[in-house]
Amino acid sequence: MKYIKKSGFGGVLQCYYDKIDQHLLTTLVERWRPETHTFHLSFGEVTVTLQDVQMLWGLPLGNQVISCTNHRWEAPEKQERCQRLLGLSLRGVDITNNTLRLSSLLEKNSGTVFPDHSGSTVYYYHLQNLENFEECGKLSWGSAALAYLYRNLCKAAEPSAKEISGPLMLLQLWAWERIPQIAPKIKETFQFDGPFGGRWRGSLSWSGVAKHSMAHYRSVFQCLNTDQFIWMPYVNAETQINRRYKKGSACWKCDTYLIYFEIVEPYVPSRVMRQFGLFQTVPTNLLLTREQHNTLHSYSGRTGLKDWKEHHEHFVAHWVNRMANIVTGSACGGEYKASPEYMSWFLERTAFFVQNPSAQTGTSTRDGNIGGRFEMLGQALGEMHRMSSQDNPYNVNDQLGGVQQLAAQYLNLAGAQHHLDYQTSHLAS
């Protein structure tokens, strides 16, 4: 435990929780946009930030990125390093290509933060960082973890993807903190002797909360509004959490690049300003074009010899000088609103539904496609309101005809066309 703390992973160990809800994660992937590294909800963009990584897991954010040169070590040298650094005598089958089967030391830190798709191996290159635990704890493990999460979300969002890997517990904790409707209730009071994510490690109650149901999660996400999303969950905790888990907090709001070996991912908090208590405006900084993003995603650190730190020199320098790109703006005053310009801009670029609103996905009210239908109803009523306004240039008959046609169209889409055949008694004039 002493050495794990020195290495910078003590917070991860304190927050260790291995019950992953794959249905929740899959529903989040459906709303992930690889080109922006944000989740799209009806009211705008949200994402996992460096603040979440530090507050939930306490991973350090140093100047030195996690990167190195790919070496082709022979099996005897790999085994010698494992013996010297881990105290383990590993067989050849435990070290394959550039991956290492998890040991007890790595299982609850690197294995939680940087697992591969199998969940049982990590990069062998991590052993280089264990040569000196003091120096290891100064590395920017937090930005590396977020880069790895972003990359795996992007891969999982591809149409052909069948699985997701990466620091999935971090993503689940983020969702629980931000969206109470899908989170269990914490039965025990959290003692602030570690990162904020540790509070989910105690006794939890799932009473009244659905879990492992994609239909339910889809419905919740579709219905979610600005007031239901927790924009600043750590606002009261920041004064109580140990200072060592907040070192580097100044860079939480910096538009920059996240680096982890061959991985480079844009980090753009200017797209989620409300998560930092700022009024959301139209973002202008993409950092990478789609072509550049695709090129970076084509790199693989598993084969070939390459000095990734040198290869990504431009991005590394940007990270080192990240404080020159702090996002600023007007305080939102607790209302967490976005500018009308932003919402118009966003609504032109998002997909309203991840599922056909008219589709029936379950037999119960809880599991049905309620969220999609609710959103569709809201859109229809909004359009009817605009059509019937006094500023509408059409005459009254045209307006009424348009409203009637729109009502019939949306009722048919929602599978509720029977309401056209009779008058609803409790709404009768």
Image: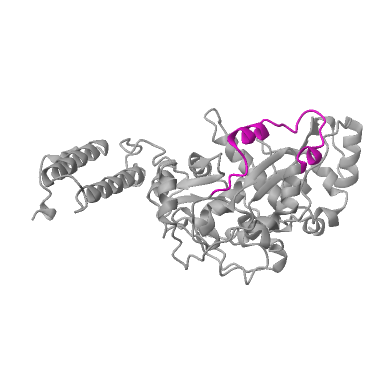
Instruction: Give the position of the N terminus as an image quadrant.
Output: bottom right
> What's drawn in magenta, residue-wise?
284-313
Counting from the top left corner in percent of width and height, residue 355 is at: 39, 37
The residue lying at 32 percent from left, 36 percent from top is 360
Q: Relative to 239, does residue 385 appear above or below in the rendering?
A: above
Counting from the top left corner in percent of width and height, residue 66 is at: 77, 46
The residue lying at 21 percent from left, 52 percent from top is 391
Q: Quadrant of residue 380?
A: top left
Q: Quadrant of residue 303?
A: top right
Instruction: Give the position of the C terminus as an image quadrant.
Output: bottom left
Nearest the eye: 233 or 41: 41
Q: Relative to 35, does residue 146 appear above or below in the rendering?
A: below
Most distant residue in the bottom direction: 239
Left or right of residue 139: residue 131: right
**Number of numbered callouts drawn:** 0
Left or right of residue 258: residue 1: right
Q: Is residue 297 magenta?
A: yes
Q: Quadrant of residue 61?
A: bottom right
The residue lying at 85 percent from left, 37 percent from top is 90
Q: Is residue 28 magenta?
A: no
Query: Can see residue 167?
Result: no
Most distant residue in the front direction: 393
Counting from the top left corner in percent of width and height, residue 208 is at: 41, 56
Left or right of residue 122: residue 167: left
Counting from the top left corner in percent of width and height, residue 213 is at: 44, 43
Query: Can see residue 321?
Result: yes
Q: How is the image coloured?
A: one colour
Most distant residue in the left direction: 429
Nearest the eye: 226 or 172: 226
